[in-house]
Amino acid sequence: DKHFTPPGGIILINPDTVHTGEAVDHHGFEMVCLYPTIAHMQTAVFELTGRHQSLPFFAEVRIDQPRLIDNILALHRVLAQETSPLECESRFVLTLTQLIKQYADIRFNEQRLGRERKAVRQARRYIDDCFAQGITLSQLAEHVSLSPYYLLRVFRAEVGMPPHTYLESVRIRQAQRLIEAGQPMVEVAYEVGFSSQSHLTHRFKQIIGVTPGQYAQQLRSCS
């Protein structure tokens, strides 16, 4: 069978399916491929159902779902940049579970969220204390004795943002303090846990609205 997809479409290929890919015309095409392992899929199924069972089967080959497409592209970007283990793992878990929930042949009742304020407080405290380290979702979940997927859901429900976004906000607040103390930008970036000065600049401007250099200049002009 042949399946055609427009730009921005998704093709799902089950294990052991012989497949190829080619352009429909001379313009060619560019694609993003994700190859989750059997272990990844089994873990995602267990996160959703609480049971160990067979691998999910996807009956639909081509799907067009803008939100899912955006999530896959965002996952690909953070995996390529290798900037935040917490964000990489979080987006990976959410993307796989979203695919399985919406398109796989597995039936389940998703666990209802409880009031996990103590666990979320512990998770926030862990991030506050270890923000400069390469925190992973697995480490954070183990620290508070929750499953990774459940922690992602309950953390967002309680805090209003996922753990990796909270981590970024903590790092930026600390970066502000160091800039106010006159520390060089390169040192600021590495001391708060960013992989490079450019990554600090990008995130700082996203959250604060100005670059770290502009922020430092504003401080000097006010002093």
Image (cartoon, rainbow, N blue to C red):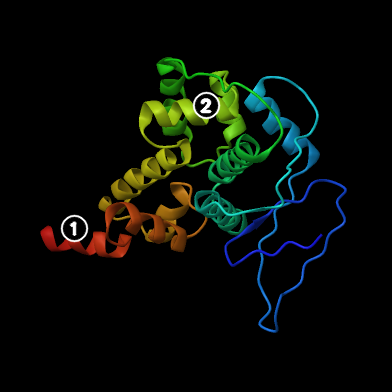
Q: Is residue 140 above or below residue 173?
A: above
Q: How many marks?
A: 2
Identity of the residue furthest to the left in this view = 222
Give how far across and how far down residue 147 sits, in percent: 60, 24
Answer with left or right where residue 171 lies relative to residue 218. Answer: right
Q: Secondary structure at mark 2?
A: helix
> Quarter holding the N terminus?
bottom right
Q: How many C-alpha atoms fall within 10 Å of the one at disc 2: few (<14), some, or many (≥20)?
A: many
Q: Nearer the viewer, residue 125 or 24?
A: 24
Q: What residue is rendered at 25% in x and 59% in y?
A: 215
Q: Secondary structure at mark 1?
A: helix
Q: What residue is rendered at 70% in x and 47% in y?
A: 60
Q: Amino acid at mark 2?
A: Leu
Disc assigned to residue 219: 1
Q: Nearer the viewer, residue 141 or 94?
A: 94
CA gap, disc 2 to disc 1? 38 Å
Mark 2 or 1, closer to the camera: 2
Q: Which residue is mark 2?
A: 151
Give how far across and how far down residue 154 sits, in percent: 46, 25
Q: Amino acid at mark 1?
A: Leu
- The quarter of the displayed image where residue 40 is located: top right
> Quarter holding the C terminus?
bottom left
Q: Earlier in the sequence, mark 2 or mark 1?
A: 2
Q: What residue is rendered at 32% in x and 60% in y?
A: 212
Give how far across and how far down residue 10 sits, in percent: 64, 56
